[in-house]
Image: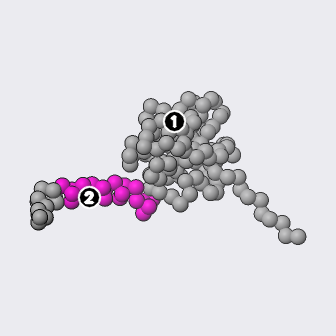
């Protein structure tokens, strides 16, 4: 029995799908300034801006810093990584109380970081956040320099 040649239409469909898949990879590329990051949370303190920028009962996305800050009550702040736990893409906006991942449509609750729509199932990592000098600061506290004995 001889093998049938692959129909031209099948080859073209496969090429189109491979191209579309490549665009998805490009959107989540590690080369992107706002895409994947080696660490999903800040490894040093990052100044975000005025606490007044975060609405009470809402949240603000600091996309370049890869942090999402919510304000459950006046003067209370919670922060989460803004890097999707599914494929590592940076969240692009907040819609109806959810951080949105543009790559595959995952959504995360801004108050808890929980994945509320897949494909992501793992919550966003929490990030320490505090007010210092009238500004929101995310990330770990500054490390104390070691004293020499």
Percent coordinates x, y for residue 74 in the rendering: 63, 30
The magenta stretch spans which residues?
13-33
**Residue beneath disc 1:** 109
Percent coordinates x, y for residue 148 in the rendering: 85, 70
Label 1 SS:
strand
Picture colour scheme? one colour
Percent coordinates x, y for residue 147 in the rendering: 84, 66
Image quarter of residue 34: bottom left
Percent coordinates x, y for residue 81 in the rendering: 55, 47
The relative height of residue 121 versus residue 142 in the rendered view (above or below) is above
Dot 2 or dot 1, earlier in sequence: 2
Identity of the residue furthest to the right in this view: 149
Label 2 SS:
helix
Tell me if I can see residue 53 in this picture. no
Tell me if I can see residue 75 in this picture. yes
Left or right of 149 on screen, residue 124: left
Viewer-proximal residue among 22 and 61 = 22
Q: Nearer the viewer, mark 2 or mark 1?
A: 2
For marks 2 and 1, give the CA distance: 33 Å
Identify the disc placed on residue 6: none
Identify the disc placed on residue 18: 2
């Amino acid at each position: 029995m001889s093998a049938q040649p692959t129909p031209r239409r099948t080859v073209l469909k496969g090429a189109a799908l491979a191209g579309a898949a490549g665009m998805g990879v490009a959107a989540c590329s590690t080369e992107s300034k706002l895409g994947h990051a080696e660490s999903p949370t800040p490894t040093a303190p990052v100044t975000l801006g005025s606490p007044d920028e975060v609405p009470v009962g809402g949240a603000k996305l600091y996309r370049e810093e890869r942090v999402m800050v919510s304000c459950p009550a006046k003067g209370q702040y919670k922060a989460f990584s803004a890097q999707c736990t599914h494929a590592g893409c940076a969240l692009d906006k907040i819609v109806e109380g959810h951080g949105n991942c543009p790559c595959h449509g995952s959504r995360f609750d801004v108050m808890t970081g929980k994945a509320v729509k897949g494909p992501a199932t793992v919550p966003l990592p929490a990030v320490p956040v505090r007010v210092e000098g009238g500004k929101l600061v995310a990330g770990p506290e500054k490390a104390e320099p070691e004293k020499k004995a």
